[in-house]
Image: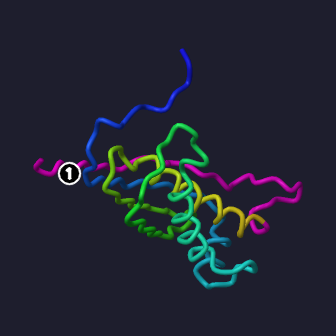
Amino acid sequence: MAIRQVDISGKRPVRREAVAVGRIRLRPTTIKLIRDGAVEKGDALQLARVAGVLGAKMTPQILPLCHSLRIESVEIDENLGEDYVEVRSRVVATEKTGVEMEALTSVCTALLNIWDVVKQYEKDENGQYPEAEIYGVRVLYKVKEDAAP
């Protein structure tokens, strides 16, 4: 069977929403640097928000079978635990197909950017990352609101 993009031409646009979440495990000392605004490369959480929005918008360029969508809203929130940063992304569009891949891509992009700006604090003496881990990336929920014809 050949790879192909699904034909959505017969569908009508409806409001779609998806919320995804994921975490990056980091050393407590790295979390403290993030909390204190002391990361050398800058504000890791602000970068994660901007990168998450960009990730949602670029989803069809990264995932070749995803349709290009007119995203109407991307909201990125984060929560800092003792040894993790949790990122949540909410994506909304009025389209013919869902936005869960955009929400997932948004979360992953945000988490990867956090890793990038704090990696110097996570390396061990051999240049490895024994504690840093991205995990728990999933869709919390998605909504498809069918409007009356």
Q: Is residue 146 left or right of residue 4?
A: left
Task: Please name the residue shown 47% across and 69% down the image.
Answer: 78
Task: Please name the residue shown 60% across and 49% down the image.
Answer: 61
Q: Nearer the viewer, residue 23 or 109?
A: 109
Task: Please name the residue shown 17% across and 48% down the image.
Answer: 146
Q: Is residue 119 magenta?
A: no
Percent across and percent down for residue 65 are 52, 37
Q: Nearer the viewer, residue 98 or 5?
A: 5
Q: Nearer the viewer, residue 95 or 111?
A: 95
Percent across and percent down for residue 136 are 49, 48
Q: Is residue 123 left or right of residue 141?
A: right
Q: Which residues are magenta?
A: 120-149
User: Which element type, helix, strand or loop, lies under badge 1?
Assistant: strand
Badge 1 amino acid? Glu
Q: Is residue 124 magenta?
A: yes
Give the residue pinned by disc 1.
Answer: 145
Q: Nearer the viewer, residue 138 or 49?
A: 49
